[in-house]
Amino acid sequence: MEKEGEILLKPGQQIKPHVPNEVVHQLVFKLYNLEVASVKELNSYDDKNFHVTVKSDSALPDIHDACPHGYVLKVLNSLDSKAYNLIDAQNEMMLYLAKTGLPCPRPVKNIDGKSMSLEHLKDAQNQSTDQYIVRLLSFVPGKILFSVPYTKELFFQVGELVAKTDLALMGFKHDGLKGVDRIWNLIAVPKLVDFVYVIADEQKHSLSMEVIENFKSNVIPFLQELESGPIHGDFNEQNILVEADKEDPEKYSISGMLDFGDVHFGYYLFDISIAICYMMIECKSMDMLDAPGHVLAGYNRVRPIPQKEFDLLKDCISARFSQSLVLGAYSYSQNPDPYLLTTAQRGWQCLKTLWDCPKSELYKRWNEIINSYANN
């Protein structure tokens, strides 16, 4: 097994597994002794994820793993499948957070009593390929945040969720989180220069390079001064669940979180910056530059933001925009799935608007919004 630090994506590398529906049926039966009733593929960048329902839970190796809402079969990409210890850390983190009362998926034990296994799969030409880690997780019901109208109340709750997760994970320890070098970690932004070639538009290419260089010069040198710990690493609009109010179906509240594929030992500043980036992209209910203020107000209510972190927010939010846009374009060049361009639909304009606004103006309006919650 390769070391965790050797799972960094390289240009030209194709890592997404080929998993037709019949293979989903076979894997679920072979590994979990369950007969699939229905299969629905879920969105994913590099993995293959399927929501499956089964004909009966009674044959589960551990009946305590039974989930009334079905399960998610996850077949990891060939790169992450080499990081067995990291995936074990993801499984343990989900169990850890669930015990703290934060709703998230839980790993299901297979017939060998394990939370995952390595399986040989074949490609579309029926040729044998690499081994892939296969897991089954409990399905957490709810709508994804992306699918409902955004409100300042939801943004505030997103900030609270990120901070509560960061605080809860301060007590989580696992060797699998150490030394994880991945292209989606925000600290890997300088490595984006190897992927920017996929951005053909000159202005967008130039903007990406400017943001990357700014991150290298204005963020990297100050990281040792920031608070760090285990982080989720990808609080985006597809990974946060909401539920409708029973008395008012038009009103939603945060109900859970998904996708622990980017967890690592990182900086709390990065977790909140990533969340803010994705809240801004689909923000149509208010000025997108005000959205961060509401997210920060919720975060600050749970974990007060140190001034050193606050001062670097624009740099880190912009860096995540660039990272998401560049890697989304790269992934699309390897696998033309429209889902991979979700960020690009509004992201470039959002990045330009954010980048063109002076820090002093941004921070003034964000602080005003944070302060407006002081007496609530």
Image (tube, rainbow, N blue to C red):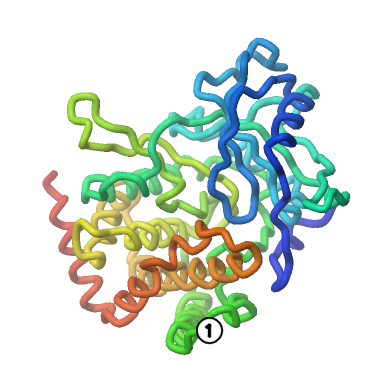
Please say whether residue 95 is visible from this viewpoint.
no
Q: Please give left or right for residue 111 compared with residue 94 in the image.
A: right
**Identity of the residue drawn at 19% across and 60% down:** 286
Q: Which of 121 and 183 is in front in this view?
A: 121
What x and y, as percent, mark residue 118? 80, 40
Q: Please give left or right for residue 82 compared with residue 209 in the image.
A: right
Kind of residue at disc 1: Ala
What x and y, as percent, mark residue 352? 34, 78
Instruction: Indicate whether 356 appears above or below 46.
Output: below
At mark 1, the secondary structure is loop
Q: Please give left or right for residue 132 compared with residue 374 in the image.
A: right
Q: Nearer the viewer, residue 127 or 296?
A: 127
**Identity of the residue drawn at 58% across and 39% down:** 93
What x and y, as percent, mark residue 277? 38, 63
Viewport quadrant of the C terminus = top left
Q: As drawn, which residue projects farthest toward the top?
A: 58
What x and y, as percent, mark residue 309? 38, 66
Q: How crowded is mark 1: few (under 14 residues within 10 Å), some or many (20 or more)?
A: few
Please say whether residue 229 is visible from this viewpoint.
yes
Residue wearing tag 1:
200
**Identity of the residue drawn at 82% across and 56% down:** 2
Instruction: Indicate whether 343 appears above or below 47.
Output: below
> Which picture quadrant has residue 72?
top right
Q: Please give left or right for residue 36 compared with residue 151 in the image.
A: right
Q: Nearer the viewer, residue 115 or 125?
A: 125
> Which picture quadrant has residue 115?
top right
Instruction: Indicate whether 285 appears above or below 334.
Output: above
**Identity of the residue drawn at 18% across and 25% down:** 247
